Amino acid sequence: MGGQALASTVIADAAAAGVYLSDEQWRLIARYRDLVLEWNEQFNLTAIREPAGVEQRLMLDAMRMVPVLDGWLARMNVTRPVRLVDVGSGAGFPGLVLKIVRPDLRIVLVEATGKKVRFLEHVIATLRLDHAEAIHARAEDVGHDQGYRERFDIATARAVASLPALLELCGPLLQTGGVAFFPKSLDLDQELAAGHRAAPLVGMVIEESTILPHSSTRLVTAVKMGYTPARFPRRPGLPAKEPLGGTDPAR
Ligand code: SAH
């Protein structure tokens, strides 16, 4: 099944973004792409169904986060293995790509849909990724589990919820000094304003929102500055339904 080589442009595009992988890592990326395409025929894992789309929009866009991640990790100077949580991981984006590109990361993928968790477990086993765990749960519940609360250095979430909800779901999982990365679309003004209002309520500050090179993704970076009150995250569904920070008083 599958087994086609990656489009030659993928390696060049990654290099243009400053990401260089070994042959073995490219083999893992290609195998992962094949698994996404194979499983997607049976289960609705992602709306992106074409090989080129999976390579460009899922694999490469996640890789383009790596230089930003590396920069923050260098500044954070964590002296033990770095722990990353990917919230609403779906078919593993961006969490599994980041794990392949930076194998020293210890990753936890949080996903509410069982069939997607089974896929994530299958990929982890097939690619023999170590220190990678997929958990079938909602982030609202994981955030109150003492095994996971305030345990992570990095949090990521792509295409899961609006910024206020993401901050409420990811903030409790981060240690003080930890950083969250949210890939978003370019047109973000209102959502960003809402995010700025929500962030301090959960001990976070939005530091940057930069357009990733050669892409149409804006990467929002938020830092955990202090304590997240114990009542966050609120019960499942509320972070998205009643976003923190309310509506813009100017509107
Ligand atoms: N990050 C992936 C998936 C995006 S789809 C990608 O970029 O391709 C959003 C995913 O988040 C879905 O699989 C959904 O089941 C999951 N999700 C949404 N809210 C969640 C929550 N509160 N906790 C855990 N998973 C959640």
Image: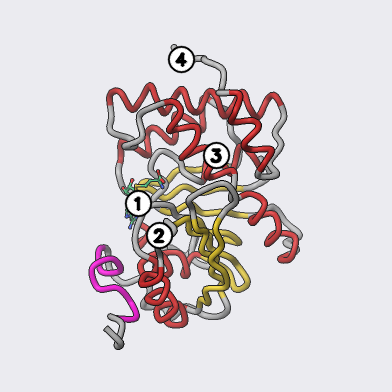
Residue 240 image offset from top left, x and y in percent: 28, 65
Q: Are marks 1 and 4 in contact (CB under 8 Å)?
A: no
Q: 126 above or below 96?
A: above
Q: Mark 4 — residue? A: 2
Q: Counting residues from the N terminus, which is met first, the one under dot 1 or under dot 2?
A: 1
Residue at image position (59%, 28%) is 9
Secondary structure found at label 4:
loop
Amino acid type shown at disc 3: Leu
What kind of colouring is applied to the model shown?
A: secondary structure
Q: Counting residues from the N terminus, which is met first, the one under dot 4 or under dot 2?
A: 4
Q: Is mark 3 within 8 Å of ligand 1?
A: no
Q: Counting residues from the N terminus, which is met first, the one under dot 1 or under dot 4?
A: 4
Q: Is mark 2 within 8 Å of ligand 1?
A: yes
Q: Nearer the viewer, residue 32 or 234?
A: 32
Q: Mark 3 — residue? A: 60
Amino acid type shown at disc 1: Ala
Residue at image position (59%, 47%) is 64
